[in-house]
Each structure stands twice: as C-alpha cells, then as structure tokens.
Image (cartoon, rainbow, N blue to C red):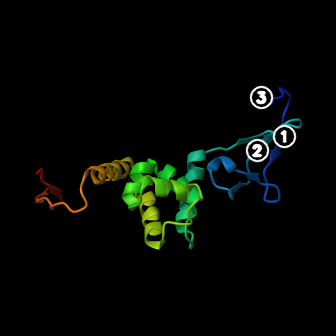
Amino acid sequence: MRCSYCNIEMEKRRATEAQPYFFRLSGLDDLDLVGIDVYTCPKSHAEVPIIPRVGQLHSAVADGLIRQPRMLKGSEIRFLRKHAGLPAREFAKLVGVSAEHLSRIENGHTESLGKPTDRLVRALTLTAKDGREARTTLLSIADGLKKGTKHGKREHASYALRGQGWQRQSA
C-alpha cells in the first residue's frame, strides 16, 4: 500500500495489546483496536487501518457502552445516537431536551443528561438499532412530538382480535 501524501510504500504492522490502533475516527477518545492490520507511512506517519466488519465492530462498541455501569459521556451519547440512525433534532425531542442542549452534551460543553435521561438514551438506542421498523416508529413519534402540544386530548383507541393477535383499528 502506498501513502496518498508521499507516494511511498507504507509499513504494515499488526495492532496488539501492547501497541493497539487508537480508533479516533469512531468519535470516542478511548477506543483501541487489536488484531487488525495498520499501514504507516515512514515519512508522514499517516496511518491507514484495515478494519474488517466495521458494522459488527460498531454494534459491539454500542453494546459495551449501553451495558457500562456509569453515566454516558457526551461522545458516547453521540456514538449511540448515530449507531441507532437517529438524527440529533429528533433524538433530542425523544429524550426530552432541546437540540441545543443535546449538542452541548455531545460536544462535551455540558456534563450529562441526568440519570433518568441516560437510561432513556440506552433504551432508545437498543430499540432503534434492532430494526428499521423501530427506528421509523421512533422518528415518527419525534416528529409528532415536535408538531404537537404538551397536553393534548387522548384519541379514542380501538383494537380488534384478528387471527392470532390484536391489531389497532384505524381511527
């Protein structure tokens, strides 16, 4: 592999626990990768990692973040939101904060969302990442919350037993 800056041959190394690859492009400042090939230019010191199955890596990182027993940092919230495929404005609406406040948190200018909202971020991420339908439903809810009022009248709901399950009837 040749360096795109210097056009000279890059040196290959295997990332190890003793010398990991610091995966800063993830947006997380403390994510190291081991067991991948990394090409380094001897002149410019540019690095090019070869990261197989990136989607699987992102899922593993998201699962690790969701399960950690401490409050999420702003960069971790941003990673989870992006992994779930939720735009910032809609995500902010779903967790009950302004888009500006979410931005300050994700960029490290404000400490945290608070414990209840932290748990909500984790739950939304788990729900949204598990499927397109959940993500579409969450985005629809966020859109409805954006357009709606704080206290609206509950609409009448009707459900019918059809086949093996219950289905909501059209209003």
Residue at horizontal 15%, vertical 62%? 154
Tell which of 31 and 161 is nearer to you.
31
Residue 7 has which mark?
none
**CA neighbours of label 1 inside 10 A, class few (<14), some (14 to 19), many (20+):** few
Q: Earlier in the sequence, mark 2 or mark 3?
A: 3
Residue 45 has which mark?
1
Q: Earlier in the sequence, mark 1 or mark 2?
A: 2
What amino acid is labelled 1 in the image? His
Residue 4 has which mark?
3
Measure the alpha-carbon separation of dots 1 and 2: 15 Å
Give the quarter of the image for residue 16.
bottom right
Q: SS of the residue at dot 3?
A: loop
Quadrant where the N terminus sits is top right
**CA neighbours of label 2 inside 10 A, class few (<14), some (14 to 19), many (20+):** some
> Mark 1 and 2 residues: CB-CB less than 8 Å, in contact?
no
Image check: 156 left or right of 80?
left
Asked if one can make out residue 40 in the rendered structure from this viewpoint, the answer is yes
Q: Earlier in the sequence, mark 3 or mark 1?
A: 3
Give how far across and how far down residue 85 sits, in percent: 45, 47
Front: mark 2 or 3: 3
The residue under label 2 is 37
What amino acid is labelled 2 in the image? Asp
